[in-house]
Image (cartoon, rainbow, N blue to C red):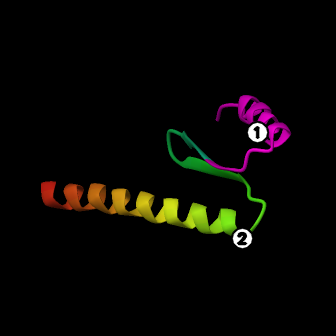
Amino acid sequence: MASLDNIYDMLQNLDDSGIEYLLITIQKGKKTGKADVFFSLKDKASMKILSTGLNEFNKEIDKINQKDEDDE
């Protein structure tokens, strides 16, 4: 698997800038894959905003899954 050094540098820059974030990295391997989750949220309002965004993301995933099922 690849090094995450660049990711850690970016996270440090986000932290230094006071930017809240959710970052998911995906590394595909020959047999298995790996996902790493990094986040920095400061308060409940940030969590609510993120939750809304993740709900929209889930809707997009559902569309992809439905298309895959329709193609079978």
Q: Residue at x 80, y 44 (%)?
A: 18
Q: Residue at x 61, y 69 (%)?
A: 48
Q: Residue furthest top?
A: 6
Q: Residue at x 67, y 62 (%)?
A: 46
Query: Within 10 Å of the Cα at label 2, are there few (<14), some (14-19), or many (20+) other Cα atoms?
Result: few
Amino acid found under the numbered disc labelled 2 = Lys
| Position in image of residue 53 (x %, y %) | 50, 59
Start and end of the magenta stretch?
1-23
Residue for badge 2:
44
Residue 4 sits inside the magenta stretch: yes
Q: Residue furthest left?
A: 71
SS under mark 2 = helix
Nearest the eye: 46 or 30: 46
23 relative to 46, above or below: above
Query: Within 10 Å of the Cα at label 1, are there few (<14), some (14-19), or many (20+) other Cα atoms?
Result: some
Which of pointers 1 and 2 indicates the residue nearer the eye? 2
- Tell me if I can see residue 23 in this picture: yes
Residue 5 sits inside the magenta stretch: yes
Nearest the eye: 30 or 52: 52
Identify the image quadrant of residue 47. bottom right
42 relative to 2, above or below: below
SS under mark 1 = helix
| Position in image of residue 11 (x %, y %) | 76, 39
Residue for badge 1:
14
